[in-house]
Amino acid sequence: MDGLSFRYGERVALDGVSFSAEPGEIFGLLGPNGSGKTTLFRILSTLIPPQQGTARIFGHDLRAELNEVRRAIGVVFQAPSLDKKLTAAENLRHQGHLYGLGGAELSKRIEEMLARVGLSDRAHDYTEKMSGGQRRRVELAKGLLHRPKLLLLDEPSTGLDPGARRDLMQYLKELSRKDGVTSLLTTHLMEEAEQCSRLGVMRAGKLVALDTPEALKARIGGHVVTIKTRENSAFAAKLKEKLGVEPAVVDDAIRVEQEDGHSFVARVVEAFPGEIESVAVSKPTLEDVFVHLTGHRFWEGAERGTEPPAKQGKH
Amino acid sequence: MMLAVYSLTQRELVRFFRQRNRVIGAFAQPLIFWVLFGMGLRGSFDKASSGGASYMEYFVPGVLAMILLFTAIFSTISIIEDRREGFLQSVLVAPVPRAGLVLGKLLGGTVLAVLQGVLFMVLAFLTQRGLAFDPLRAAWLTGAMALIAFSLVGLGFLIAWKSESTQGFHAVMSVFLFPMWLLSGAFFPVTAETPAWLAWIVALNPMTYGVALLRHALYPAGERALPGIPELPVSLGVTAAFALLMFVCAQAVSVRRVQGDLQ
């Protein structure tokens, strides 16, 4: 990707995004809704052509060599793409035909893929009769049937319970290790992002950071101290004045990044006795990284259709 | 690409037969029309305009045209469903040229429409004295039906590709397609008493030539005189040209992206 931009009418969805993924890695794109990651996904999956900038997949240009690109990628959409009136095996057979596979070779692959996603016994069930997790696995089998070198997944954990989510990440890692398949996935779940080998953080159409999850967390260093008081903004001002730190008021708490969180807490408690309702010291999480990078709480970043934070609380 | 076309066609058929009420509905409606109108209008029909055929017999090509029109157009509703259910997106990113996608859809709808047309044709053979079974007649009719159905599925594709809901599609159906059928010589013949403006509309309606083609196909050996309808070469030529035009247009429109894909 180099200088990729895209706009829907007036709204700029992607603003000069550049990056490259290494073969075999699991590359995550983290960002809230409206950050442009879905637009980026649509461009990569050849659903829409790039407007500005260049994009190549394994050296094939996304504008000029569409067929080569399409053959090299497997796509798992966020929205289901199975034909509910067909069985799992029929869905896969149809998919195989679209990619020019047929005959005994295709039958063998269908069997193989269904076994790999653990659905051999459900091969002849209509997909409308399957559970969300099972359907998701058929989708994955569908995306992998033609043995793509790059697997694109848009919010792959949508509708999956935590167990199925772990299985999925495990499977992607196995694919990378055994077959050298590169995975590129978009996500808004921190714990999923945590599992990626590298992570691009997106906000408002821009790629604001790109590194391994560990390196991203190391940028903050030390600890994150979260303090709750009755009057957060006033207290933050006092903190800044007295202790010379850079506090940020996020939602109903004050966040301070400190090399040594523990001694900082001691200083705060000493300086402001009785004013603190609660205080917590933690190692930085990816969410802290996000706040650090953008100055916003993760869920605030959404321009439209904000995901309720309740979704976060589920796990 | 042929494999993809075959697969898309086959999928249309499988989907159709797995929805039993669709199978019944598609066949029952024209049949009811045929029996009710055929019986009701029998007395007021002037046999001179049909070369001596009874109204029931005269109405056979009209009912065939209706079966083809309804089945063909409704088969393209699956495009809207495919888009809504997400199936279409995986076809759109597959290494298949859009012409393959269009051809698959069009052939699927065509086969469905012709299958039902053939069922009705057999019924007409069995019940109409003027229309006994004759291999030449059956072959002509089937070929004509295939050509007409193909053009109509193409027309349906054009309408369906940009429709975002099946309701909108139904609205187009009633204001546009039904009159198209009504004014094609399917329901009543154009005679000297037909007002000139109406005769013009009939002459400009591509469906008129399809119905005329069916009428000619019904009498391959010229068993009946067919006054007031286009000659066979004209009927065949216009219908074939219409079919080709619809395919080209459907292919052109399928390259365009639709808002529905970006949701």
Image: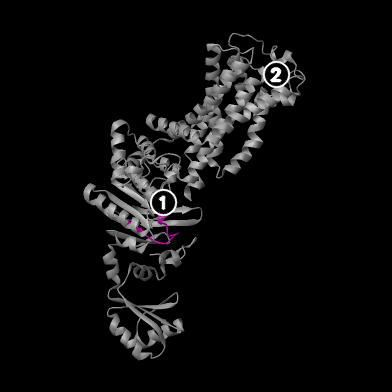
Q: Given the image, on which type of amino acid does mark 1 rest?
A: Gly
Residue assigned mark 1: A132
> As drawn, is B144 to the left or to the right of A214?
right
Q: Amino acid at mark 2?
A: Tyr
Task: Tell me the quarter of the picture where residue B125 sits.
Answer: top right
- In this view, A88 is above or below B5: below
**Is residue B143 rendered to the left or right of residue A28?**
right
* Relative to B148, residue A266 above or below: below
Q: Judge left or right: residue A140 versus residue B246.
A: left
Q: Chain of mark 1?
A: A
Q: Is residue A45 above or below residue A259?
A: above
Where in the figure is residue B11, as x and y percent of width and height?
Answer: 44, 34
**Magenta stretch: includes residue A38:** yes
Q: Residue furthest front?
A: A121
Residue A299 location in percent, x, y? Answer: 44, 66
Using a 10 Å C-alpha cutoff, classify the residue at mark 2 as few (fewer than 14 neighbours), some (14 to 19) or many (20 or more).
Answer: many
Q: Position of residue A167 (x, y in %)?
A: 31, 55
Residue that badge 2 annotates: B55
For disc 2, the chain is B
Q: Nearer the viewer, residue A86 or A44?
A: A86
**Label 1 neighbour load within 10 Å: few <14, some 14-19, many 20+:** some
